[in-house]
Image: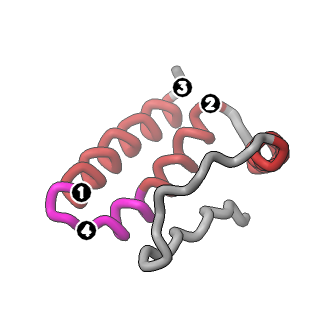
């Protein structure tokens, strides 16, 4: 493991601890934003670039669109969460 990878691993561990604390204090939106940063750091550690991630997301969307959707348990009173889109 190179020195820069060791530094990234240390940063990743710190970020994950911060996310854990944010979840514990019910700061969900901040924790979700931090999850995006954690994903970015993990991608760097694994050598995955944004084009690879986009290709994976596109393939998952194609598969999801071709599968029949089960009946939703949500009622009209509950708003749907927006889908997370990765933009670089």
Label 2 CA crowd tier, 10 Å (few <14, some 14–19, many 20+): few
Q: Residue at x 44, y 31 (%)?
A: 6
Q: Which residue is mark 2?
A: 46
Q: Earlier in the sequence, mark 3 or mark 4?
A: 3
Point out the stretch of residues depicted in magenta. 23-34
Which mark is drawn over residue 23?
1
Q: Is residue 3 left or right of residue 20?
A: right
What is the secondary structure assignment of the residue under circle 1? helix
Residue 64 versus residue 73 in the image, above or below: above
The question of residue 32 being in magenta is answered with: yes
Q: Earlier in the sequence, mark 2 or mark 1?
A: 1
Which mark is drawn over residue 2?
3
Choose mark 2 or mark 3, whichever is in front.
Answer: 2
Q: Which residue is mark 4?
A: 27
* Residue in the foreground of this view, choosing between 19 and 71: 71
* Residue in the foreground of this view, choosing between 8 and 2: 8
Q: CA distance from mark 2 to mark 3?
A: 13 Å
Choose mark 3 or mark 4, whichever is in front.
Answer: 4
Specify the quadrant of the image occupied by residue 63.
top right
* Residue in the foreground of this view, choosing between 25 and 73: 73
Instruction: Assign the C terminus to one quadrant of the image.
Output: bottom right
């Amino acid at each position: 493991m190179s020195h820069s990878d060791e530094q990234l691993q240390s940063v990743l561990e710190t970020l994950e601890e911060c996310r854990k604390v944010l979840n514990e204090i019910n700061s969900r939106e901040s924790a979700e934003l931090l999850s995006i940063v954690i994903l970015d750091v993990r991608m760097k550690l694994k050598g995955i670039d944004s084009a690879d991630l986009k290709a994976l997301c596109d393939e998952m969307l194609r598969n999801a669109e071709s599968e029949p959707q089960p009946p939703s348990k949500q009622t009209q009173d509950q708003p749907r969460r927006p889908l997370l889109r990765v933009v670089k």
